Amino acid sequence: MRPFRFGAVVREADSGKAWAEKARRLEGAGFDVLLVPDHLVGPRFAPIAALTAAACATDRLRVGALVFANDFRHPAVLAKEAATLDLLSGGRLEVGIGTGWMAQDYAGAGMALDAPGVRVERLREAVAVLKGLWGDGTFDFRGDHYRIDGLDQRPKPVQRPHPPLVLGGGGPRVLRLAAEQADIVNIGMRVRPDGSGPDTRDGGLEAFLGKLQHVRAAAGDRYTRLELGTSVVQVGARKAEETWSAADSSSLDETPQVLLGTHNDIVDKLRHWRDEHDISYFVMHNERDLATFAPVVEELATGRG
C-alpha cells in the first residue's frame, strides 16, 4: 500500500516574495508537491518560472505542472526546460503533461483546437520524445507530428531515467495512454471536445470507478508501479465554484474529488479511497481550502497514514 502524498495547486501571487512565502507555507504544512496549471488565460503564472522560484524558496517541496499543455510548446523545448528545472531543484520535479483543451486558450492565441483524437496522438508522440531526449546519448524520432534528428540535449535530468511523468484525464484514450506510459495517473472528468469545459455527464461514482478499472486493465503488469491520484475540488463545506475556474463539482459528490464533512469525515474518506481503490495522491485544487485541508495532510502525512 502506497503512503499518502498531497499536492496543492497554486496559481499566482502579488510578488516574488509572496510567491516564495506561499511555497514555504505549503512545505511547512506538510504538503509534498506544489503544482501550477498551464493556461494562457486567467489569473495564473507561467509554470516554468513559477516552479523554479518555488523550488529555490524551499528545501523539500517537490514542484510540478498540472499539467503542461502539449500544444503550447514543442516537446524538445519542454524536455530541455524540465531537465534544467530538475537539476536546479535537486531532483524535485514532477512533469505533468496533457493535450491542452481549454478553447479560450486556443482562441485567444489564434491556435487551432484539433479534434481530441489528434491531440491525444500528438501527446503520445510528445511523451516518446520527452523520454528519448531525457535518455543518454543522441535521440532520433519520426512521427506524424514530431521529428527529432540526432539531438543530444544537456543537461540530463537528475532523476533517472527521468522525472516522474504525470498524465491524466477522464477520457478512455488519454487514460489508456497514462496507464501505458505514466508514473502517476491523475483521474478527473472528461472535457467536452470543443474545449468549453468539463462534461458533467462524466461525473458520479460509477463513472469514476469505471475509470479506475480502465486504468487497471490498460496498465497490465505496470499497474503495481503506478501511483494513482485525483484533484479535490471541494473540501469541508461546499462553496461556490470560483469564477475563473473551469471546475464543476456538481456531479462529483460520491467521488474523492469532493470531500465534504468534518475533519474526521475527510480523513475516513481518504483512507477509504486509498485502501479500497489505490488512490494515494490527492491534490488540493483551491487555495481557499488550505485551512481545512492542512490539518488532514498533517494527520495523514507520509509514514503516518
Image (tube, grey):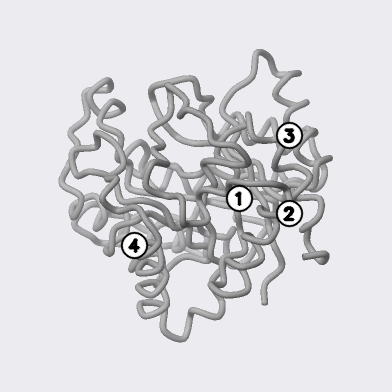
**Residue sitting farthest toward the top:** 14
In this rendering, would 81 be left or right of 124?
right
Q: Nearer the viewer, mark 1 or mark 4?
A: 4
Label 2 or label 1, whichever comes before in sequence order? 1
Vertical comparison of 221 with 18: above or below: below
Instruction: Name the amino acid, label 1.
Output: Pro
- At 62% from the left and 64% from the top, the residue drawn is 280
Check whether the beta carbons of the residues at disc 4 and disc 2 lie within 8 A of each other: no
In this rendering, would 145 be left or right of 165?
left
In this rendering, would 189 be left or right of 233?
left
Q: Nearer the viewer, mark 3 or mark 2?
A: 2
Distance, label 3 to label 4, CA atoms, is 30 Å
Q: Which mark is residue 291?
A: 3
Instruction: Label 1: state its secondary structure.
Output: loop
* Depth order, front residue of 250/218: 250
Label 4 or label 2, whichever comes before in sequence order? 4
User: Residue 259: x, y in percent?
Assistant: 57, 49
Instruction: Name the amino acid, label 2.
Output: Asn
Distance, label 2 to label 1, CA atoms, is 46 Å
Q: Nearer the viewer, mark 1 or mark 3?
A: 3
User: Residue 215: x, y in percent?
Assistant: 40, 72
User: Residue 53: x, y in percent?
Assistant: 69, 30
- The residue to which callout 4 is attached is 207
Label 3 or label 4, whichever comes before in sequence order? 4
Label 3 or label 2, whichever comes before in sequence order? 2
Distance, label 3 to label 2, CA atoms, is 15 Å
- The residue to which callout 2 is attached is 264
Vertical comparison of 285 with 92: above or below: above
- At 64% from the left and 47% from the top, the residue drawn is 7
Q: Residues within 10 Å of mark 3 (few under 14, many from 20)?
A: few
Instruction: Label 3: state its secondary structure.
Output: helix
